[in-house]
Image: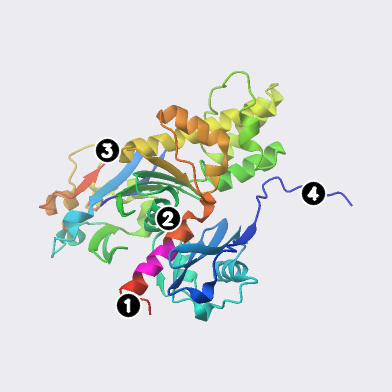
Amino acid sequence: MVEVKEFWRWKEYNWKNPDIQWKDAAVITAGVDVGSVSSQAVVMCDNEIYAFANMRTGSDSPNGALNAMKWALEDTGMTLDDIHCKVGTGYGRVNVPFADRAITEIACHAKGANYMYGPTVRTIMDMGGQDCKAIRCDEKGKVVSFLMNDKCAAGTGRGMESFASLLGVSIEEVGELSLQVEEEPPPVSNTCVVFAKTEATGLLRSGWSTEKVLAAYCSAMAHRVVSLLERIGMEEDFAITGGIAKNVGVVSRLEKELGVKALKPRYDTQIAGAMGAALFAKALVEKGENR
Amino acid sequence: MIANYGYKDGSGDFFISIDTNKCMECEEKPCMEACPAGILEKFADDYNDVVVGVKEEHRKKIKYSCAECKPASGKRNLACQAACKPDAIAHTW
Ligand code: SF4
Ligand code: SF4
């Protein structure tokens, strides 16, 4: 049988902090970020990350939320009932059956980035599965201004997945490969994924290498989000969250165009939203508003 | 908070910016009634402040939702802005 390679497939995994005994924690909270492409669940014990899972959402978001949560809790002995407050976020946030509250991904990404990168972060570019969000926040991670572009898949993880499939390159190698060009090509002119794919096919036929086409696409993605950042006003420190933050080809071009370096993440950038949701859950417990 | 609702596409930037710090102090929220297309709604945001935003179903077609107030020829009449004394609403197009 011929093996069909899934070039778009990124690594799904779960993680548990071996240094934390959850039974000793005073407050246990969880955040679940259900996006159209991926879902993440983060469990925090007294504001420390205890466990998380990062996986594809699948076709139904209530199950996506539960699956992510179950996977984060795998081999921990913890059940949903042990968690004092659970907050849902993301596109499917209203479909998290076990959540005590739903909070927008904008507020959760700001809160999560504040924790992940520290209180100096003022501008966040979330490049997620299906949309891009430019967010400005204060030193507490409270949103000061935001702008979201979810009208088309250009500049998003879904766009990058379909591009990786088209070129037959593993999505995790796209960024590195895109940097293996002697000279930076002009960005693909079309930001719409459908047209960009047609354009890429034409460029390959005309003799461009795969690396060069990838460089042109990563460059177009970076250029597209720069305009969102310009609209809300760029202020340092700057951080990127979401799956595209792992693509060095987009990140380095974005940094070059902006003339600023993005902060280095301490955690998986895809869990920023779920992390923020878990932090909101902790605040709700402290205010006695968790049920 | 400055909340920007709308989108950017090949034909331009179409965003409505709302300064929610002003909305939370605005009791009557007259912009909602004034908008002929009914695209504005009142809600409690993530920080529990009662503010105004653009309804979800209009965010990806805002250029068309606001077309009545912005005729291609003739005078623009942005009823939302006219009703908003604190000057909290701005349009990018
Ligand atoms: S009238 Fe102006 S300040 Fe009042 S709710 Fe509407 S946009 Fe906000
Ligand atoms: S421009 Fe007109 S249609 Fe658009 S929000 Fe303002 S009042 Fe409503």
Q: Which mark is residue A4?
A: 4
Q: Determine the chain carrying the residue at label 1.
A: A
Instruction: Give the number of the mark in front: 4 or 1.
Output: 1
Residue interval drawn in magenta: A277-283
Q: Nearer the viewer, residue A252 or A74?
A: A74
Q: Nearer the viewer, residue A91 or B40?
A: A91
> Which mark sits nearer the N-terminus, 4 or 2?
4
Disc 3 residue type? Ala
Q: Is residue A252 left or right of residue B13?
A: right
Q: Are marks 4 and 2 on the same chain?
A: yes
Q: Give the residue pinned by disc 1.
A: A288
Q: Give the residue pinned by disc 2.
A: A112
- Marks 2 and 3 sit apart, C-alpha to C-alpha, by 43 Å
**Chief secondary structure of the magenta portion:** helix
- Marks 4 and 3 sit apart, C-alpha to C-alpha, by 52 Å
- Label 4 CA crowd tier, 10 Å (few <14, some 14–19, many 20+): few
Q: Is residue A245 left or right of residue B9?
A: right
